[in-house]
Image (cartoon, rainbow, N blue to C red):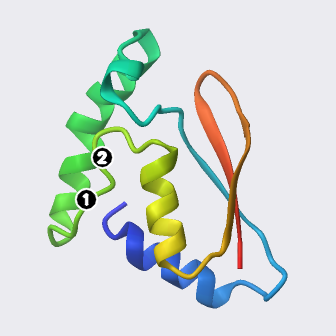
Amino acid sequence: MGDPDGAARRVRAALAPNGTWLIVAPFANDRLEDNLNPIGRIFYGASTLICTPHSLSEGGRPPLGAQAGEARIREVVEGAGFRRFRRATETPFNLVLEARP
């Protein structure tokens, strides 16, 4: 995503006052050493070759990082004006996060 902060602000502006934004993201822990497993290594490789270059090609805005964990996504979501944020569920491959105004 080329502009995660702008996308989060746009979702917040479009969402009803009692709405919910469900965010499905590749599973990542907040610390690098906690992602050094077979799935994490695949996700880092994909991010290095696909996600980060794409983000930078859209103007060099600050990307989320090679593997954005829950804490980094929370920063973006709360920066856009959401006040409630939680991990709704997870799988070995994805985090499902819930944000509400």
User: Disc 1 and disc 2: Cα gap in Å?
Assistant: 6 Å
Q: Residue at x 80, y 77 (%)?
A: 19
Q: Residue at x 42, y 37 (%)?
A: 30
Q: Residue 58 vs residue 26: left or right?
A: left
Residue 91's place in the image compared with 76, above or below, is: above
Where's residue 77, x and y in %? Answer: 53, 68
Label 2: which residue?
51
* CA neighbours of label 2 inside 10 A, class few (<14), some (14 to 19), many (20+): many
Residue 44's place in the image compared with 65, above or below, is: above
Q: Residue at x 65, y 88 (%)?
A: 14
* CA neighbours of label 1 inside 10 A, class few (<14), some (14 to 19), many (20+): some
Where's residue 82, x and y in %? Answer: 62, 76
Q: Going by the picture, which residue comes out furthest to the right?
A: 18
**What amino acid type is highlighted by mark number 2?**
Cys
Q: Going by the picture, which residue comes out furthest to the top?
A: 38
Q: Nearer the viewer, residue 31 or 95?
A: 31
Where's residue 47, x and y in %? Answer: 30, 37
Q: Residue 44 vs residue 19: left or right?
A: left
Secondary structure, mark 1, is helix
Label 1: which residue?
55
Residue 11's place in the image compared with 35, above or below, is: below
Secondary structure, mark 2, is helix
Where's residue 83, x and y in %? Answer: 66, 75
Q: Residue 82 vs residue 101: left or right?
A: left
The reply to whether callout 1 and callout 2 are in contact (CB within 8 Å) is yes
